[in-house]
């Protein structure tokens, strides 16, 4: 679609498919996110935004639709603010967001569409690194060049096809390999540049037009059935359907003719309109006189002779427009975003299943739970906030009627000859008119004039005068000298020089004041620019005036072809500027001459072969060996992306990337679980190995991805340049419940091998112990293994370090080891080693365009297979946690030599009695208490019993007092709970506003 003199855009609708969304995100320069305000954000929206982040994040603008479904203005404002804050959180603060009120006749309002188109036309796109370094093409159509006989003999034969589209990115070399997303890699059999089917106005040659009916092509959409001209390499075909729109009853033909007459059962709206036009017998004027139109349903139709012109006031649409206020105070921060909760909603109208992303259920129910007084306060605060934010946009509406009336009296309106000649009479009617009011329903009343205004033929005796009347104050006085001087240059005797700027500007200013100068009440400014004047005038002037204005603009354009801008003229008058311009022109001419001499007679064809096909050319690419499923299962809704593969990116190898699990993904990722990666143009499935880099640059193997930090992932896939974005998915099906983006990352390096090591502990037991030396068994299986680990460091569980020495002859795997201290028989000796882990070389490209199913055949995880087959997880006995049963260790007695005991002091001598073989009489002697002693012992026992009882009673009473005290405190806190909660809410709200103001100042 042509949108400007040097601008052409391509509009593509993103399908509701994850594969198509990935491909579209790689080529899109501007993304328009359609958000249903009545439904909220969908999971697909956030998934698509994450895809955009990995490919460089092009420009994004949001559009809120279905705003007419809200009945209350407060609910509408709250919803708009909530969705805007969520949208700004995902994109950036101040991202453009448009509001579309609703559909009228299956179309959005024209003013809202014009506003959106204006921003799209002015949008400047950022060059992304991947697209700038790689050529690519969005295919607008393709053809199957395979011979029909081969297809008839074998329907599954590989096809030869030709792809058409505009080239983008870098230059496409003829010998370059290409990748069709969703199909595979191919070599180009032939590539040529065709004539542009939709040329830019700056490139099209208007002198080649044969006659005036030939118009410029501003729209080209072959797959959307727009345009009948098809360009081919050797010829040009024009498809004209042989449909006869004449009514069969009026057509006199033989019964044996083969003309395609449209049957009644296949009629569409256009054919019925054509046949109805053929049946008309009266003229246009006669039909207009008797035409009638019912304004409301069930009302009396109004005839054309009953209609009188009524002036209507200005109407403004406060709901439509855009919102890019960066100073909006928002309490939503990125650190406080909760994980979205997915809600499956079945749409009864369209029948589709929608996945709603709900971030905070309390936010959606805030209006229902709040009281009426709080609603009124919040309403007033929001209105004040909106007035503050949009004060500059609404200020021009103040006193609109007064300014319009003043401007109407001051300005000179353009004379409309059609209205003067054919318009209604301006002679006032003296007769009194009665109004006939016919009620139609409860809200609308149709107003019609009385019978005296039905026809002007009653005024036969009226004074002959012009149909238009003018105020005498509007007529200029041409008798003054100033007015005569102002039109002096309009005649032959005047100054006709084009560059007499001062007088000409004044004349043009006067001319504009007299004809066509106006003030746009919607924009609020006095329009003087030519483009804005033309755009605004198209909305208020008649067709005849529009044609006159366009004719004048074209005349001025051709008349001022050689005239420079005044500012450019002043710059060219500068000698230095003139010299720079001349040098630039000279260098450009020299470069063009050298290029022409280099390519010689071959010209553009040789240049394309050597330099490559440039950005913006319309190319035709022929490839062979395409699977037949590409033609059989082709769906026009899925985009076809052709990407160029420079040298070095055509091979497969090991790719190491910085990878992080997405915070919204439900589970952590496991090593060697298959993931679908999107890197560059390709989408493929591979088995990643996760690792983390230690301080000594060792990449340590990880079984699972970390929760909230990056790790390294090594996969086997196509060679890709570093700093290329990566996004991974576990499942591509839309029936998957949850967030489908598993992780994101960036390519770090590419190599034929990477070292990822895994920790391994070898365990052994001591067989013999000799002071600092011990014989270890069970760690190795042969003398060769011992020789390989000779000199390796070992240690015990208690922390005693040692080294591996030589193997013991005659035993399998036993060796001698030395330690820094004597070890025990019960110590376990282990050796820490690192074993290299090789990534599995698995590469499974996702061929989504070769299947009609949404989910192509991919490798499944072990969990999916067990779930489908209903297999339980196998349990290993050694992996179960058992209670540890340790035998109590018995230590040997401490033996002190007798000589040492003799020298020790008496207090330090061990008092160890010797074990007697027989019991002495002392152990057998009975202890008999005296009567006094028995009384004393009994008294002490009674005292102790009383004491224990008193302590127990005291404890029970104290516990009861504590329980009563806690209940009393709970009742007191419950009384003031609402007060404390309100104080906290006010305090947190004030703190949030203060933080927002500080951010706004920064």
Image (cartoon, rainbow, N blue to C red):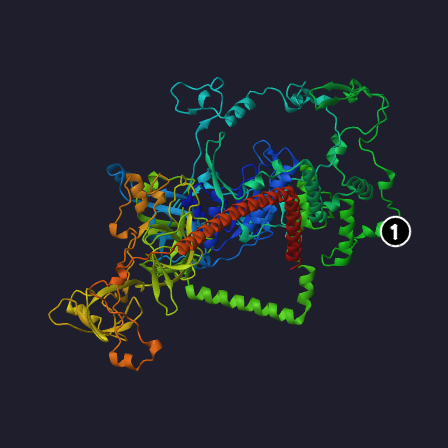
Residue 739 at x, y percent in the picture: 44, 45
- Looking at this view, name the residue that lies furthest to the left: 810
Q: How crowded is the residue under tag 1: few (<14 C-alpha within 10 Å), some, or many (20+)?
A: few
What is the x, y in percent for residue 725?
43, 56
Q: Residue at x 47, y 67 (%)?
A: 594
Q: Nearer the viewer, residue 927 or 277?
A: 927
- Extreme residue in the right direction: 480
Left or right: 380 as drawn, with respect to 65: right
Residue 860 in view, yes or no = no
Q: Is residue 537 above or below residue 297?
A: below
Circle count: 1
Residue placed most toward the observer, 987 or 193: 987
Q: Is residue 256 something one can see in this rendering? A: yes
Check the picture and name the quadrant holding the C terminus: bottom right
- What element does badge 1 sit on? helix
Q: Quadrant of residue 850?
A: top left
The image quarter containing residue 718 is bottom left
Relative to 55, is 464 above or below? Answer: above
Q: Nearer the viewer, residue 331 or 782?
A: 782
Q: Could you say where residue 776 lies in the image, as x and y percent from the top left?
A: 20, 68
Residue shown at 65% from the left, 72% from the top: 576
Residue, far front: 931
Q: Return the x and y of residue 125 as percentages of the image width and height.
A: 54, 54
| Left or right relative to 88: residue 317 | right
Q: Which residue is mark 1?
A: 481
Q: Is residue 759 left or right of residue 781?
A: right
Picture layout, residue 899 above or below residue 368: below
């Amino acid at each position: 679609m042509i949108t400007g003199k040097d601008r052409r855009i391509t509009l593509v609708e993103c399908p509701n498919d994850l594969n198509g969304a990935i491909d579209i995100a790689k080529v899109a320069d501007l993304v328009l996110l359609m958000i249903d305000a009545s439904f909220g954000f969908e999971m697909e929206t956030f998934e698509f935004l994450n895809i955009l982040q990995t490919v460089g994040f092009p420009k994004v603008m949001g559009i809120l639709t279905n705003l007419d479904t809200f009945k209350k203005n407060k609910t509408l404002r709250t919803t708009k603010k909530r969705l805007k804050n969520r949208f700004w959180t995902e994109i950036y603060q101040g991202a453009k967001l448009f509001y579309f009120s609703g559909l009228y006749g299956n179309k959005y309002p024209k003013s809202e569409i014009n506003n959106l188109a204006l921003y799209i036309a002015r949008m400047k796109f950022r060059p992304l690194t991947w697209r700038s370094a790689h050529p690519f093409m969005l295919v607008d159509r393709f053809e199957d060049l395979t011979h029909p006989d081969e297809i008839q003999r074998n329907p599954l034969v590989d096809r030869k096809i030709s792809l058409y589209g505009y080239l983008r990115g870098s230059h496409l070399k003829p010998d370059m390999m290409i990748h069709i997303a969703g199909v595979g890699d191919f070599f180009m059999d032939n590539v040529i540049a065709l004539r542009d089917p939709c040329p830019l106005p700056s490139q099209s040659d208007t002198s080649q037009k044969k006659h005036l009916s030939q118009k410029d092509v501003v729209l080209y959409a072959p797959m959307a059935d727009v345009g009948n001209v098809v360009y081919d390499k050797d010829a040009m075909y024009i498809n004209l359907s042989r449909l006869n729109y004449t009514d069969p009853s009026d057509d006199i033909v033989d019964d044996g003719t083969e003309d395609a007459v449209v049957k009644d059962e296949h009629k569409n709206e256009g054919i019925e309109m054509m046949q109805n036009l053929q049946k008309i017998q009266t003229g246009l004027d006669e039909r207009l006189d008797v035409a009638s139109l019912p304004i409301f349903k069930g009302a009396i139709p109004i005839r054309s002779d009953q209609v009188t012109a009524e002036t209507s006031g200005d109407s403004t649409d406060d709901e439509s427009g855009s919102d890019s206020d960066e100073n909006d105070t928002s309490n939503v921060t990125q650190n406080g975003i909760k994980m979205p909760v997915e809600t499956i909603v079945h749409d009864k109208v369209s029948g589709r299943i929608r996945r709603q992303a709900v971030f905070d259920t309390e936010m959606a129910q805030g209006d229902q739970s709040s009281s009426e007084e709080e609603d009124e306060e919040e309403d007033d605060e929001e209105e004040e906030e909106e007035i503050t934010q949009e004060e500059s946009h609404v200020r021009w509406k103040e006193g609109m009627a007064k300014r319009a009336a003043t401007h109407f009296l001051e300005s000179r309106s353009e004379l409309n000859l059609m209205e003067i000649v054919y318009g209604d009479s301006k002679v006032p009617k003296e007769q009194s008119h009665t109004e006939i009011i016919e009620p139609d329903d409860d809200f609308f009343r149709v107003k019609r004039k009385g019978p005296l205004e039905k026809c002007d033929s009653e005024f036969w005796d009226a004074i002959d005068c012009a149909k238009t009347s003018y105020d005498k104050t509007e007529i200029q006085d041409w008798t003054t000298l100033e007015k005569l001087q102002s039109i002096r240059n309009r005649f032959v005797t005047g100054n006709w020089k084009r560059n007499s700027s001062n007088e000409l500007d004044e004349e043009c200013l006067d001319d504009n004041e007299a004809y066509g100068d106006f003030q746009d009440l919607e924009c609020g400014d006095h329009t003087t620019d030519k483009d804005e004047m033309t755009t605004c005038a198209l909305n208020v002037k008649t067709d005849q005036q529009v044609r006159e204005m366009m004719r004048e603009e074209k005349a001025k354009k051709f008349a001022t072809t050689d005239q420079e801008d005044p500012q450019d003229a002043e710059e060219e008058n500068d000698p230095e500027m003139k010299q720079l311009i001349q040098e630039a022109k000279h260098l450009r001419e020299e470069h063009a001459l050298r290029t022409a001499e280099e390519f010689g007679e071959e010209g553009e064809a040789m240049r394309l072969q050597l330099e490559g096909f440039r950005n913006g050319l319309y190319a035709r690419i022929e490839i062979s060996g395409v699977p037949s499923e590409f033609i059989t299962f082709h769906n026009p809704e899925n985009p076809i992306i052709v990407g160029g593969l420079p040298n070095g990116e055509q091979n497969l190898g090991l790719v190491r990337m910085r990878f992080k699990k997405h915070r919204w993904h439900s589970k952590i990722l496991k090593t060697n679980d298959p993931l679908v990666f999107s890197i560059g143009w390709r989408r493929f499935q591979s088995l990643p190995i996760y690792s983390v880099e230690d301080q000594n640059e060792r990449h340590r193997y990880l079984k699972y991805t970390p929760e909230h930090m990056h790790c390294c992932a090594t996969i086997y896939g196509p060679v890709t340049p570093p700093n290329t974005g990566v996004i991974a998915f576990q499942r591509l099906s839309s029936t998957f419940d949850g967030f489908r983006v598993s992780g994101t990352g960036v390519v770090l390096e590419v190599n034929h091998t990477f070292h990822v090591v895994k920790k391994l502990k070898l365990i052994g037991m001591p067989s013999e112990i000799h002071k600092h030396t011990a014989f270890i068994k069970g760690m190795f299986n042969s003398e060769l293994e011992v020789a390989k680990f000779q000199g390796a460091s070992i240690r015990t569980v208690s922390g005693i370090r040692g080294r591996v020495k030589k193997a013991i002859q005659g035993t399998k795997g036993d060796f001698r080891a030395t330690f820094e201290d004597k070890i025990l028989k019960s110590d376990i000796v282990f050796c820490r080693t690192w074993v290299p882990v090789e990534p599995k070389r698995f590469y499974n490209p996702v061929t989504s365009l070769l299947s009609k199913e949404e989910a192509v055949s991919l490798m499944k995880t072990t969990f999916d297979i067990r779930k489908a087959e209903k297999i339980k997880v196998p349990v290993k006995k050694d992996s179960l946690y058992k209670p540890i049963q340790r035998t109590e260790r018995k230590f040997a007695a401490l033996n002190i030599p007798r000589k040492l005991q003799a020298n020790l002091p008496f207090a330090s001598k061990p008092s160890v009695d010797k074990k007697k073989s027989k019991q002495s009489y002392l152990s057998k002697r009975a202890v008999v208490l005296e009567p006094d002693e028995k009384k004393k012992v009994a008294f002490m026992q009674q005292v102790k019993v009383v004491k224990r009882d008193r302590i127990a009673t005291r404890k029970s009473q104290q516990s009861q007092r504590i329980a009563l005290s806690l209940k009393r405190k709970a009742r007191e806190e419950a009384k003031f709970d609402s007060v404390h909660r309100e104080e906290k809410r006010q305090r947190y709200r004030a703190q949030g506003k203060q933080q927002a103001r500080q951010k706004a100042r920064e």
